[in-house]
Image (cartoon, grey):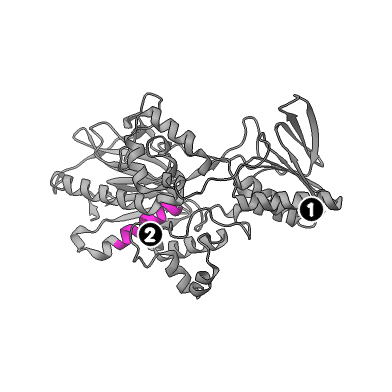
Amino acid sequence: MSQVLPGDDAPLVHDLIGIGFGPSNVAMAIALSEHNASVGREETVTAHFFEQQPSFGWHRGMLIDDATMQVSFLKDLVTQRNPTSEFSFLCYLKSKGRLTDFINHKNLFPLRVEFHDYLEWAAAKVDDQVSYGHEVVGVTPFVRDGVVEYLDVTVRSAEGLAVHRARNLVIGTGLRPLMPEGVERGDRVWHNSELLAKVEGLEGTSPTRFVVVGAGQSAAENVAYLHRRFPEAEICAVFSRYGYSPADDSSFANRIFDPDAVDEYFEAPEGVKRRLMDYHGNTNYSVVDIDLIDDLYRESYREKVLGTERLRFLNVSRLTGVKETPDGVQATVKSLVTGEENPVDADVVVFATGYSPADPVGLLGEVADRCLRDDEGRVRVERDYRVATDADLRCGIYLQGGTEHTHGITSSLLSNIAIRVGEILDSVRERGAASAEARPVAGETGSAAR
């Protein structure tokens, strides 16, 4: 339950404050809503989330109209945790009048634009728990008798700065677009995360060549989209392999995403963790759906037959330089076989070079010094997704992402969201119950350490 500390200026104390409101923390808000609806007032968990975007949005720049999800619709925000939830993808379909049509479609993998619409629909149902247009800019400890009793979260919005107090944080700040070292985004040098917005800026022009760098699903989707969207333009795909590698989505391989696999990965020795990632990286990293591979090859062959080649695959090659010019971009492509470098003039170069997790404790300031790290300098994370801290920090800091080294490949994926948020909620409740007797009584005061 929320608690107001004694003192004229003491802020309300939330059981949980969430940083970011992407799919993971939307799922967290839903789990909280469902829990609170099922218990008495004394057992409710109070929470609020802060999101710097003005509204919900998830990879909007990648919502290509024919791109499909790579995970089953059953791995939505709730179903694996609560199959009867009113927040499921099936309930969404029912509300939109498309349930029967979807069943007749006989497909586990909805369009990405449809799944995004589902996420928006779900987020809207719990929007009383979130403040959009609010950016968390810092976290400071509230110290009482030498221990950190609460965390003060400073939030910036159009109204200015405000401080909110919490017993626990759940950080879901997502991934950051990754560009090759030394390459900066610009008007004609894009990351694929901004593809659709940038393409709109080309309206009224007649681009003649695009270069797409990367060998994964997003790269292949970008190639197919640009080829279709600009029927007069040449699309050059640059990657270091001979061709796109198919994703392994076979039934046994998919067990790497099972909830039980998280337990096994967490308990495994470091050497086994590394081997598991090597064995099963082809379920997610730098791989492409086989249907898309076949479509691109079929189109490439058709163009060769007709003598109208617009798809060019610069394989076993690497882009070694990119320079914006007044009229476009000059890319330098190096053959990994011969070492020969060739210039490729283009209107735009698109880097589909992936993402990197945001620093999980980057916002914590001096609180980060209390977070424990392993021998490789990585944040130590307990099985319940709580950052391991020194004994004098009584608050829970939970991570939704940035835990691949401890929890495995599902860390930043949709596959295990529903289960993960349930485990975090259970941990918050259990730790709250255990510390209830130690909570301050009327008349006690504390100080915010700055």
> If the image is split into quadrants, where does the N terminus sit?
bottom left
Residue to which mark 1 is pinned: 302
Q: Secondary structure at mark 2?
A: loop
Please check the rendered image and state whether residue 32 is part of the magenta-colored stretch, yes or no.
yes
> If the image is split into quadrants, where does the C terminus sit?
top left
**In the figure, residue 196 lies in which quadrant?**
bottom right
Residue 69 visible to an observer of this rendering: yes
Could you tell me residue 40's position as x and y percent?
19, 64
Residue to which mark 2 is pinned: 78
Q: Which residues are magenta?
A: 22-34
In whole angstroms, how far apart are the C-alphas of marks 1 and 2? 44 Å
**Is 321 left or right of 361, judged from the image as shown?**
right
Do tag 1 and tag 2 residues touch (Cβ < 8 Å)?
Answer: no
Viewer-closest of 207 and 293: 293
In the image, what residue occupies the spot 78% across and 44% down?
Answer: 347
Could you tell me residue 443's position as x and y percent?
14, 46
Q: Which mark is drawn over residue 223?
A: none
Q: Report the magenta stretch's main SS.
A: helix
Q: Earlier in the sequence, mark 1 or mark 2?
A: 2
Of the residues shown, which amino acid type is indicated by label 1? Answer: Arg
**Is 382 left or right of 185, judged from the image as shown?**
left
Could you tell me residue 69's position as x and y percent?
54, 56
**In the figure, residue 447 lies in which quadrant?**
top left
Viewer-closest of 410 and 248: 248
**In the figure, residue 316 lies in which quadrant?**
top right
Q: Nearer the viewer, mark 1 or mark 2?
A: 1
In the image, what residue occupies the spot 45% across and 51% down?
Answer: 414
Please check the rendered image and state whether residue 239 is part of the magenta-colored stretch, yes or no.
no
**Is 413 left or right of 224, judged from the image as shown?**
left
Q: Secondary structure at mark 1?
A: helix
